[in-house]
Image (spheres, rainbow, N blue to C red):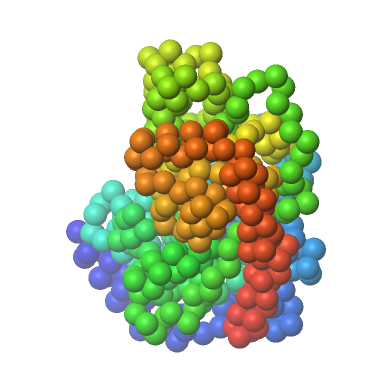
Amino acid sequence: MLNGLNTALGRVADASTVRAARSKPVLTSSARPDASRMRLGYLLNIYPAVSETFILREIRLLRARGFEIEIASINTPNRSEDQMSDDERTETENTFYLKRHGLRGALMAHLGALSQPLRYLRGLRYALSLGGGDLTRALYGLFYFTEALMLARWMSTKNIDHLHVHFATAAANIALILKHSHGIHLSLTVHGPDEFYDAPGQNLAEKLQAADFVVCISRFARSQVMKLTPASHWHKFEVCPLGVDPARYSPAAHESDGQPFTILCVGRLTPAKGQRVLVDAASRLASAGQAFRLVIVGAGPDEAQLRDAVDSYGLDDRVEFTGALNQQQVLDWYARADAFVLPSFAEGIPVVLMEAMACGIPCVTTRITGIPELIRDGLDGLLVTPSDTNELTTAMGRLMGDEELRERLARDGRERVREGYNLERNVDRLGRIFEARLGELA
């Protein structure tokens, strides 16, 4: 039935729309080439998100360099304004939230789009095709199509014809539909590894081929998008790492607050972050008579399970759960930490590692995906095999017992971030990518 509907829609739409799909973007009628090189929209799933403050910093720095950036977000922030920084509150006031406009906004978008029925049918047909014949996924395609129409109205009012999407997941589905129905220009920032786990389900190969260019945050990420696309698309894939501000994240006078050796872990409490392995390693350190405090910063679905493990090991007096914290509160914990541990099973290149290294904290983490591009084992930090509790325990114990090693890794780790993961320098690089690529599209 679904395939038959697609076929019927295709017969109506195809013949009259091939040229339109290949033409210049049609959301704006008078875009000037020079202006188009500096004007674009960002589409995000949640903005500003507590775990993705790097996106806010990126946008604000690009604006300071002359880019005009308008923000659309599918969802509203998942925290109250009193939990936000001043910058986050300002961004919230100026962001277009699709779901905030509800049923009325959806109906208005459909009614407005019906004035151009061939484009409407082309978009609907393509959105339904993303389901691959599965009825449930086709229904999601219909939702994405509705959001695409709402986004198109917003882009038209803002005179935007280029959309940039962080993470090639759900939000990128909306942009992909707009690419096919309205002929907008599209670029992506691919982080990994989430995008790569279900590449067919995410329609990732199709997104990569439809995008005008793709920014990869690591060489590992670039290798994965190359694996999914013909070599004829590889020229579109740029590598531009994320970064942190070494002035904001800098070594502070150590605040021991009378506590023993402090091990810090910052991240959402999810299976991918591997915090259960950290708790298991902490129990072994305790059994070996090591004095320490483990501080776990973050919130998430694994919290109850992690607390149960701490309780079962009798570590309640050694392990502290802080919940989700804002950036200033995290900075305060960096000032008290003797070591930073992130035992992840899956990552891109974690910004929290860059922050900890910039703050002069020796780090232990796993040798997965893009992490070895940031940390070279024994030089800028210590790398262990993911899920290996023995290796993690040994590495943590090694740091605890060797002050000279801690000092060397802290010094060289900070220098590594200053050289390769400096936020301003990498945003400059991103700005040059945008200028060059958008200039080619103008």
Q: For the image shown, how many numbered marks are present on the structure?
A: 0
Q: Is 54 rendered above or below residue 292? A: below
User: Residue at (28%, 66%) from the top-left corner?
Assistant: 6
Q: From the image, which quarter does the N terminus lie in? A: bottom left
Residue 377 screen position, x and y as percent: 48, 54
Q: Is residue 23 left or right of residue 81?
A: left
Residue 360 screen position, x and y as percent: 68, 45
Q: Is residue 151 visible?
A: no
User: Residue at (31%, 64%) from the top-left corner?
Assistant: 129
Residue nearer the viewer, 440 or 320: 320
Residue 278 screen position, x and y as percent: 44, 32
Residue nearer the viewer, 331 or 195: 331
Q: Is 255 rendered above or below residue 42? A: above
Residue 62 screen position, x and y as percent: 73, 64
Q: From the image, which quarter does the C terminus lie in? A: bottom right
Q: Is 165 rendered above or below residue 36? A: above
Residue nearer the viewer, 3 or 174: 174
Q: Is residue 284 left or right of residue 157?
A: left
Which quadrant would residue 273 be assigned to in this image? top left
Residue nearer the viewer, 224 or 113: 224
User: Residue at (57%, 53%) from the top-left corner?
Assistant: 380
Q: Is residue 211 visible?
A: yes
User: Residue at (57%, 77%) from the top-left corner?
Assistant: 26
